[in-house]
């Protein structure tokens, strides 16, 4: 990631979520999964919901973009959250 991309990601994370440091790439996996699981809370993951998240992930230039495009959100939300250190720390 270039300096400008890193600075942009850092600014967006801090501005929108109050996260002061860029999480490890692995942490984004849990975030992506959690958002998609919540989006499917009504039993249906609409194409517009997936598209919104894929666009968000793309804007952050995150290498987990393909996960946002392909993940089938059938896991337990609490399990996903408990395995994602940045989300556990963010909730504290």
Image (cartoon, rainbow, N blue to C red):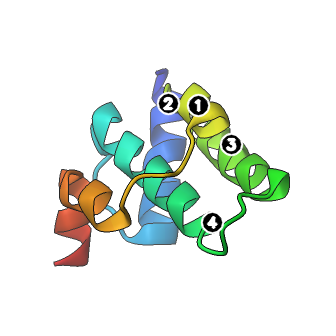
Q: Are marks 1 and 3 in contact (CB under 8 Å)?
A: yes
> Residue beneath label 3, please?
54
Where is residue 18 drawn, in percent x and y?
37, 71
Locate residue 67: give its quadrant.
top right
Q: Are marks 2 and 1 in contact (CB under 8 Å)?
A: yes
Q: CA distance from mark 3 to mark 4?
A: 13 Å
Q: Are marks 3 and 2 in contact (CB under 8 Å)?
A: no
**Regarding mark 4 in the picture, which secondary structure is present there?**
helix
Q: State the residue position of label 2.
A: 64
Mark 4 and mark 1: Cα distance apart in space: 17 Å
Q: Secondary structure at mark 1?
A: helix
Q: Is residue 83 visible?
A: yes
Is 27 placed above or below 79 here?
A: above
Q: Position of residue 26 (x, y in %)?
A: 30, 34
The number of discs equals: 4
Please name the residue that numbered disc 1 is placed on: 65
Which circle, 3 or 4, is nearer the viewer? Answer: 4
- Residue at 20 percent across and 51 percent down: it is 83
């Amino acid at each position: 990631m270039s300096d400008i991309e890193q600075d942009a990601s850092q600014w967006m994370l801090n501005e929108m979520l109050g996260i002061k440091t860029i999480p490890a790439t692995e942490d984004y996996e849990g975030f992506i999964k959690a958002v998609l699981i919540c989006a499917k809370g009504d039993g249906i993951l609409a194409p517009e919901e997936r598209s919104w998240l894929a666009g968000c992930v793309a804007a952050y230039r995150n290498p987990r973009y393909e996960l946002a495009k392909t993940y089938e959100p059938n896991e337990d939300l609490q399990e996903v959250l408990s395995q994602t250190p940045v989300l556990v720390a963010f909730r504290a």
